[in-house]
Image (cartoon, rainbow, N blue to C red):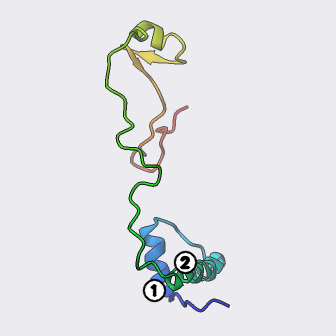
Amino acid sequence: MSKTVITDDQFAHIAKLSRLSINPDEKFIKDQLSEASDYVEVLNELNTEKVLPTYQVNHKKNILRDDVVTPSFTQEQALSQAPKSSNGYFVTFATIPAKGGSTSGGKK
């Protein structure tokens, strides 16, 4: 049994922040979250008084490359393998739901 008790209100708030809809039969997740909290709580027992904060674990500075223009595909080459294109653009299914919730507008 977990020592940390997460209330129903706290659990509902966490679910809302996480954008999760929890069904009533999934309330066991609250117990699992409490157990995970207990596990993390063990870290508070460590003496970290002389340990400096770690902000970068691999000691690399800026690993981004310079932005250099290099030869690439022409627009025609890029669109040549597309299943569907229109006026020089790729045509895909909508990814933002239209009114009514469908992402394809009811069409395939």
Q: What x and y, as percent, mark residue 91?
A: 45, 24
Which residue matches tag 1? 9
> Dot 2, how many residues are within 10 Å of its Cα: few (below 14), some (14-19), or many (20+)?
few
Q: Residue at x 59, y 92 (%)?
A: 3
Which residue matches tag 2? 40
Instruction: Please give left or right for residue 98 compared with residue 35 in the image.
Output: left
What type is the residue that disc 1 sits on?
A: Asp
Mark 1 lies on a secondary structure that is helix
Q: Residue at x 50, y 89 (%)?
A: 7
Is residue 75 shown above or below 94? above
Find the residue positioned furthest to the front: 50
Which residue is nearer to you in this view: 93 or 9? 9
Is residue 102 shown above or below 76? below
Q: What x and y, as percent, mark residue 9?
A: 45, 86
Q: What x and y, as percent, mark residue 79?
A: 47, 13
Which residue is nearer to you in this view: 98 or 63? 63
Which quadrant does the N terminus fall into?
A: bottom right
